[in-house]
Each structure stands twice: as C-alpha cells, then as structure tokens.
C-alpha cells in the first residue's frame, strides 16, 4: 500500500496548501512516479507524468524521474518506448547517469531477442553509455545478466559475472547473485518444449556473398599488394556468382530483344550496314598493312628514344642517391658497402621503407559487447545429449558460484539457486539441495520454493504430486498455468476446468492491485487531475494465452463450451469471422460496403 499512502500524502498537501503544492509540483510528481514504478503501478505512473507534462509542471524532469519511467517500460515490455525516452533526455539536455542506463538495460532486456532486429540491442545501449563517459556499476552488470537470462544466454551471463570482478574489481552484492542464478535457471530450458527462446543468430555480411571468413577478416597490415589483388578478384567473382542468378533472366531478355531488332532491319538499311562495316574493315586492314611495313623504322627510332630516356633516368637516380648519402649518418665503410650492393643496418630512428607499421589495437569498451562474443554455435545442439550436457555445465557453474558467495544469501537468492535444479527437472538432486538449504537456512523453503517444485512436477508429467503441492490459496498465475497445461495435455477435462477457474481468479486478484495489464483505471494525485485525459479500454484483459492454449484445444476437441469468465478463444473468433464472410448475410454486407465506397469515391 505504499502507492496509496503516497497519493494520500500528496492529496492532503494539495488540499491544505494549494499554492505551495503547485510550486513544488515537480518534486511531488517525481515521488508519485517513483513509488508507482517501484510498486509496478505502471498505468498510474504514466498517467501522473503525462498529466504533469500537460500542465507544464515537468518541462525538464530529473534523471531519477526518467529512471522510474524506464523501469515502467521494463514492466510493460516496451523497449522502443524506453529508447524514445533516452532520445528525449538528449534533446532536453538531461544528464544520463549510470542509474538511467541501468534502468534502460532493464527495459531493453524485455525485448524479443529471439528476433534478429533485437538480438544485439544491448550493444547499442552500451555504446551510448560509453559515448557519454558513464562508467559501469554493479547494477549495470546485474541488468546485463538479466538481459542474458531473458534469452537463456548462459555464456554471456557467465562472462559478465566474471568480468565485473576481473576487469573492474567490483563487489558482488546479493542481488547480483540472485540475477545470475535466475539467468542460469532460464538457460536450462533452452531447446526444450515451451522453454526459453534463444537469442537470434547474427550472421556476418560476407556469408551471403560466399566469401571465406579468413579472406573477409584479414588484417590490413598483413595484406601485401598481391594478396590484395587476389582478395579483390575473389570478392568480385563471389559477387558475380551471387548476382548471376538474379540477372540471368534479364540478360536473356536483352539477347532476345537484340536478335529481334536485327531481324526487323529492312533490306536497304541492311545493305547500307554491310557497306559501312565492309569499309571499316578494309580501312583497318590497310592501316595494319602499312604499319607492318614501317615496323623496322619505328623500332629503330623507339630504341634511340629509350636509350636517351635511360640516360636521363640514370642521371636523376645518381643525383638522388648523392643527396640521400649526403644527409645520411653513415661512415665511409658503410657507404662503400651500400654502393657495392650490400645490406646496411639503418639507425633505430629510421624505419625500413618497405615495412608497414601495424595499426594500434583498438581500445576495448569498459564492458564486453555481444558482437565480440559472436554467435553461440555450440548452444544450438538441441539433442538430448546436448541439452543434458549444457544443463550439467550450468549446474556446476551455479554450485561453484554459490559456494564462493561473498555475502549472506537472501531468501530470494536461495530460491533462485534452487530453481537451477528444478528448471533442469532433476528431481532427486533438487530434493537433496532443498534439504541442504533447509538445514543451513531456517527460512527456507517458502511459498516461492514450493512454486518452483510444483512447476517441475507439472513439466515432468507427475500430475498427482503437482496437484497435491499446489496450495489451496495459491495466487501465482505462472504456477497455476503450468499445472493447468499439464492436466490439459493429459486430457483430464474435469480438473482442467477447475484449474482454469482458479487461474482466472488469480489473474483478477492481480488486476485488482493494478499490477500488469488490466482494465482498472489508473490513480493519480489531484494536483494533475486537470491534465489527465483517459480513454476507455478497448479490450478485456485475461490470463496469458500461452497458459490457456492446451486447455482451449482440449475443449474444442471435446466439443465443450469454454468457461464464460475466459476471454473469447482466438481460434473460434477467426472461424466465426470466416463463416460470416461466406454466408449470404456477410456477402450482402460486403456488397453494401463496396457500393458505399463507390458512391463516396465517384
């Protein structure tokens, strides 16, 4: 109830002292937005901020206000809107510090990284941060690890986890370990049904051209002119081969058109053409014959000119050599050796003329980029052996990190470490880890640990233990959805209907608190009431469709009506629309609309 308390204080202050509250409107709005973002009341945060902007209270907001709005973008999974806020900060000359970039990375982490357009969006944020001269902080690294966990990239998570200590000597707080274990747990389900989607592959630009990576990435200082000529020739050939199929049809059409044009020439024009061509050939033949007769004379004159040119070149070369030797710091023996064609070791300050200096190494960024890591080709093995090998490697990494923790783990960190085993569906080892943690930490296990256990049992197909471990007052949507999906896949319609009702109740409870997408109108202080313009919602939000997909499919297969408290089935909705278009009523309606369009555009 922190947000309700904040609104009560702001409204009381505005009612008692309107003038003072108006003068301090920017600070009031900042606190309301910050508390709303921390309590995940994103609709209330945006309504408060937009209303203040309309009334002119926040012409140049503080960086902390933008950081709170960026956290709202992370909750709403709107990375593009977060980038627009970053551009707005640049336009208003608002300083961007490490807290702002950490919040921006949290929003960018929610981008669909399994699409090629968003695969390396994190690199763009890191480049912006380095351009602003902002040094990385532990919170920045934590958000990077979170972004790696969203796509199950354990390789990047481990690299950033080790880099912050090896390169920057940063401490590792408890929140960082919690995010690291959560990233490893998400990586356990990559390549599995309904698991985490992996990051998209970003192929180099020379792959479609058919080039060899060794040729495309050869350093400039290792490239001599002959190799450069071969590289250019190979590149041209590869491009020609790549474009050959594309322009083959065009060349054939041009050839047919040229032949057709020649056949259409009239007889008179054909005679004129042959006459002109014959005259040109005769003239060229006579010119070549006359030239062959005078070859000896011209050759003699060319040799005389060549001798004169060689004498002039020798004189110029001797003058240049005398100037070089006059300025060189060599003794008489070295000069004699040089004139006789020997080798002379030049001074240190004189560089050899044929040696090309190697370019200086490009400075690496403060944080390793994803483009430096490249694609994880080893992680593409989705076979049973490859998945088992990756899961065991992640468990080993998590165990070593937990044993070497530098701080006392919190309850959330213990649950994240326990989830590494449950997401890998290691039932026996998960039970052993739970017993070990319960003996060392009295607060473990809690309801969240029970949720991890319930999801593991449901995914393993153990319906009885999964239903028994589900609490009667469970309100976690993901846990109920996992058990519902398991029963629906097994064809148990009776239990699935009860779980569907329970899922809807849990979703409505979360909606009533204003968390996540809901139909509940946002709340905002009375100070900005005149600047808020709300529109009625255009849809009714329900539980995530991915949790209801198997249940809806079972209802359609059994010809059973779905519960009324669920939103309409997208499959049935599309079928109804197609049926309406095929009926006479739908066709008549379509013809009526077409007639109206013709009259309007006549």
Image (tube, grey):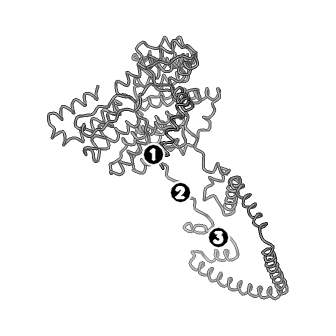
Q: Nearer the viewer, residue 201 or 389?
A: 201
Instruction: From the image, tell me which residue sits under label 1.
Output: 126
- Frontmost of labels 1 and 3 is 1
- Secondary structure found at label 2: loop
Q: Which residue corresponds to the image point at 30% horizontal and 39% vertical from the top-left?
A: 49
Disc nearer the start of the sequence (1/2) = 1
Q: Quadrant of residue 228?
A: bottom right
Q: Is residue 122 visible?
A: no
Q: Residues within 10 Å of mark 3 (few under 14, many from 20)?
A: few
- Secondary structure found at label 1: helix
Q: Residues within 10 Å of mark 2 (few under 14, many from 20)?
A: few
Q: CA distance from mark 2 to mark 3?
A: 28 Å
- Secondary structure found at label 3: loop
Instruction: From the image, tell me which residue sits under label 2.
Output: 360
Q: Are marks 1 and 3 in contact (CB under 8 Å)?
A: no
Give the image location of residue 518, x and y in percent.
38, 28
Q: Which mark is residue 344?
A: 3
Q: Is residue 502 visible?
A: yes
Q: Nearer the viewer, residue 257 or 394?
A: 257
Disc nearer the start of the sequence (1/3) = 1
């Amino acid at each position: 109830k922190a947000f309700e308390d904040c609104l009560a204080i702001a409204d009381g202050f505005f009612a008692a002292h309107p003038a003072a509250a108006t003068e301090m409107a920017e600070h009031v709005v900042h606190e309301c937005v910050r508390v709303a973002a921390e309590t995940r009341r994103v609709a209330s945060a945006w309504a408060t901020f937009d209303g203040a902007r309309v009334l002119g209270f926040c012409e140049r907001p503080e960086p902390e206000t933008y950081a709170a709005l960026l956290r709202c973008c992370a909750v709403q999974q709107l990375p593009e809107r977060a980038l627009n806020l970053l551009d707005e900060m640049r336009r208003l000359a608002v300083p961007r510090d490490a807290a702002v970039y950490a919040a921006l990375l949290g929003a960018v982490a929610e981008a669909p990284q399994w699409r090629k357009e968003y695969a390396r969006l994190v690199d763009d944020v890191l480049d912006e941060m380095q351009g602003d001269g902002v040094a990385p902080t532990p919170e920045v690294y934590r958000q990077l690890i979170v972004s790696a966990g969203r796509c199950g990239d354990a390789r990047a998570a481990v690299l950033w986890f080790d880099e912050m200590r090896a390169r920057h000597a940063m401490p590792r707080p408890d929140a960082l370990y919690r995010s690291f274990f959560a990233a490893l747990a998400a990586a356990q389900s990559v390549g599995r049904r309904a698991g985490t989607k992996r990051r998209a592959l970003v192929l180099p630009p020379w792959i479609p051209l058919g080039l060899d990576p060794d040729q495309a990435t050869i350093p400039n200082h290792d490239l001599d002119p002959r190799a450069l000529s071969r590289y250019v020739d190979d590149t041209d050939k590869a491009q020609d081969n790549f474009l050959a199929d594309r322009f083959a049809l065009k060349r054939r059409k041009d050839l047919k058109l040229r032949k057709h044009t020649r056949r259409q020439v009239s007889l008179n024009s054909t005679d004129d053409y042959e006459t002109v061509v014959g005259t040109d050939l005769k003239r060229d033949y006579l010119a070549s014959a006359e030239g062959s007769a005078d070859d000896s004379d011209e050759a003699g004159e060319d040799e005389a000119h060549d001798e004169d040119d060689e004498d002039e070149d020798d004189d110029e070369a001797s003058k240049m050599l005398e100037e070089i030797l006059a300025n060189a710091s060599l003794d008489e023996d070295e000069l004699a050796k040089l004139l006789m064609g020997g080798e002379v070791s030049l001074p240190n300050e004189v560089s050899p003329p044929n040696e090309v200096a190697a370019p200086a190494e490009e400075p690496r960024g403060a944080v390793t980029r994803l483009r430096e890591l490249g694609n994880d080709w080893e992680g593409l093995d989705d076979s049973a052996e490859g998945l088992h090998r990756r899961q065991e490697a992640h468990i080993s990494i998590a165990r070593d990190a937990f044993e070497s923790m530098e701080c006392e783990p919190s309850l959330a960190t213990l649950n994240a470490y326990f989830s590494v085993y449950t997401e890998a569906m290691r039932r026996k080892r998960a039970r052993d880890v739970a017993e070990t943690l319960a003996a060392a930490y009295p607060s473990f296990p809690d309801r969240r640990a029970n949720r991890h256990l319930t999801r593991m049992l449901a995914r393993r197909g153990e319906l009885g233990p999964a239903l028994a471990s589900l609490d009667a007052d469970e309100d976690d949507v993901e846990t109920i959805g996992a058990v519902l999906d398991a029963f629906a896949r097994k064809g148990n319609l009776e239990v699935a209907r009860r779980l569907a009702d329970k899922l809807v109740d849990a979703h409505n409870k979360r909606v009533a608190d204003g968390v996540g997408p809901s139909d509940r109108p946002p709340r905002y202080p009375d100070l900005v009431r005149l600047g808020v313009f709300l529109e009625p919602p255009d849809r009714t939000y329900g539980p995530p469709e991915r949790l209801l997909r198997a249940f809806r499919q079972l209802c359609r297969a059994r010809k059973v009506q779905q519960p009324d408290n669920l939103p309409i089935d997208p499959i049935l909705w599309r079928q109804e629309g197609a049926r309406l278009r095929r009926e006479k009523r739908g066709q008549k309606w379509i013809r009526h609309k077409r007639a109206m369009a013709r009259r309007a555009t006549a």
